[in-house]
Amino acid sequence: MPAPSQACSRLPITTVIVCCNECRHLPACIAGVSFCDELIVIDLRSTDGCPELVASLGATIRHHPRVPFGQLALPSVLGQLRNPWVLNVDPDEVVPADLVPRIAATLAAGTADVGTIGLPYQFYFGRRPLRGTIWGGTRPLYKLFHADRITIGDHPHDGVMLRPGYRRAPLENAESCPVQHYWMENWSQLFEKHLRYIQQEGVARHAAGERFGWKKASVTSARAFKRCLIDCIRYRDGVAGVLLSVFYGWYTWNCFMSLRAQGKG
């Protein structure tokens, strides 16, 4: 982290990173958010030396029991932060320096009715940026938020949800300098992570009142595959894009199977 004499140049933002065995990613991630006034790392009982590395990089470490996905740990720190604006980045995300002046300008322009600010993201599979599929191209993710104006969802893909009276605001003119999200390193990691999500999807959907139906499961899964392969890919990611589209259809189908299992319980 920058020396104390540089603190005046930092933005009034607290970065929160949730990690578990992410030593290989943390140095680049933490370097990318050095413009923030405060940095908190929530460690989910790592065994690869993450707490020691975090301390050596000048961040504050908070310990938390393992959870199925990182956002479930966020509420444990939100009431203890120095700043109301919070940037939640994953350990495998790197914020480019060119994005920082745009964030500063947006905060300075007035955000009284803004709950979340969308930063541009570019997803990578391995070290290759995705251009097609539902994950491809540059798109905003609303991971910079005002802690008093949102709630944290408990569904794998909920993210943050706005409280009434507040709106989303995309970061303007920032598509040329997206956050680099090294989303998946390989196919093994892709399946391992999403197998955890599948179980949580079924639980969350059943709790929300959704019920399983064969027709709905079949049609929705087929549409997911079509959306990923035909509507989004335009053959821009080659064989990997086709396989990712098959994976997305498989994932959608198995989320319905998880919902079906909940109904049988």
Image: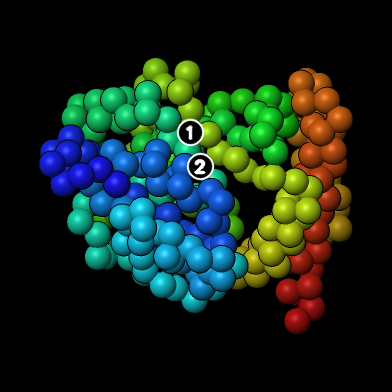
Identify the disc placed on residue 93. Answer: 2
Front residue of 230 and 33: 33
Locate the C terminus and report the quarter of the image it occupies: bottom right
| 93, 160: nearer the viewer | 93
Where is residue 142 shown, x and y percent of the image? 44, 41
Residue drawn at the location 47% of the way across and 18% of the way down: 176
- Residue beneath label 1, please? 179
**Residue 22, quarter of picture:** bottom right
Q: Is residue 94 visible?
A: yes
Q: Look at 79% across and 73% down and name the residue there.
A: 261
Q: Position of residue 68 (x, y in %)?
A: 59, 67
Residue contact between numbered discs 1 and 2, judged by CB atoms under 8 Å: yes
Q: Is residue 178 left or right of residue 1?
A: right
> Relative to 100, is 23 above or below?
below
Q: CA distance from mark 1 to mark 2?
A: 7 Å
Q: Position of residue 162 (x, y in %)?
A: 38, 49
Q: Residues within 10 Å of mark 1 (few under 14, many from 20)?
A: many
Q: Amino acid at mark 1?
A: Val
Residue beneath the point at 20% across and 44% down: 3
Instruction: Examine the rendered structure and indicate whether residue 22 appears above or below residue 228.
Output: below
Percent position of residue 191, x then y: 77, 55
Residue occupying image coordinates x 75% and y 74%: 263
Task: Give 97 or 115, whichever is nearer the viewer.
Answer: 97
Task: Give the SS element for disc 1.
Answer: strand
